[in-house]
Amino acid sequence: MRKKLALLGLGAAALFGCRNDTTSPIKDLAGVVQDLSMTPSDGPVGCTDNCDGPVMMGATIHDIDVGNIQGNTMVTITGVVLTGIANGQGHSKSSMKCEYDAYVQDPNGTAPDGIRLFATGGTCTPVDGGSCKCPYPPKSGTILDQLSPPNNDLGSILTITGTASTYNPMIPDAGLGPTQHEIDLNKGGAIMVTGTGGTVAPYVDANGSDFAVNGPGYVMYESMLVTIMPASPAQTSALDKFRGFTYAGAYFSGDYNFVYAAGNMGMYPPAGATFKSITGIAEPSFGGGVAPRVMGDFQQ
């Protein structure tokens, strides 16, 4: 069983994690509407706790991903590129607090050199059927609103301060997923935008099975941009109940379906669509899934 149950109104299944128990979100589609009154910030945002604590400068994403930096260490990483805009990830079952993430990558780093940014928002709003609704970025009220259009978009160049941490998602019928490294922005977190137009060259893999559920690619290329490019064009499967699909042996999550499937009633790509390649973020959680972000990630 995979995440995103409530996206399709199937919020009865519970997901459990070592940081917090989580359930899947019902996304607030009204929150997708961009608030044009919000403007980008050029300086640190949201530092309200532990702002003066010791911070390890010069840390790299690779250092965090391979365990060279001890957990719960405050770090500052510089020159990283926004590869995945802020996204809702449901809420904690225990605290009912909304949870959000985004992804960045070091364009000059050594693999693995991508990482998840994590922030917790306010309490979700109960709705019919026993589920809870969370406001969607850029209306989450968290520091990650900074990393959502119209404030910033893919390619923003960032300096990030936060706490190096890990997330070990687990669900009762599937067991423990790969450990996912992250930077927790909840205490002393800060984001500085230092430029735009940053690019990251995806890792290109012809062997899609490396990125099947529980495939080794999610450890070797954790949270990085990857392109699945088989020797010849391949077709997509039908979408599953989580809006994920398979292609050339790889599993693709629907985490950014609300972006690239806009105007398609959330039903893109259709079953049997043929592509030369598909690009996305290699998200390790819940067994792993490559997450396309925009229509340009699908190459026919």
Image: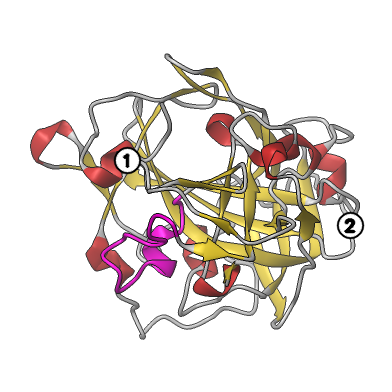
Majority SS type along the magenta span: loop
Say which quarter of the image contains residue 300. Answer: bottom right
Write down the region rendered in magenta: 254-272
Q: Which residue is mark 1?
A: 241
Q: Nearer the viewer, mark 1 or mark 2?
A: 1
Whether residue 164 is visible to the viewer of this picture, yes or no, is no
Say which quarter of the image contains residue 34. Answer: bottom left
Q: Is 224 positioned to the left or the right of 107 in the image? A: left
Q: Residue at x 66, y 40 (%)?
A: 211
Q: How many marks?
A: 2
- Local packing at callout 1 (Cα closer than 10 Å; few below 14, some 14-19, many 20+) is some
| Image position, residue 231 (x, y; %) | 75, 57
- Foreground residue among 191 and 176: 176
- Foreground residue among 180 and 300: 300
Sequence-wise, the earlier of marks 1 and 2 is: 2
| Image position, residue 183 (x, y; %) | 67, 45
| Scheme of colours in the image | secondary structure
Q: Is residue 81 above or below residue 171?
A: below
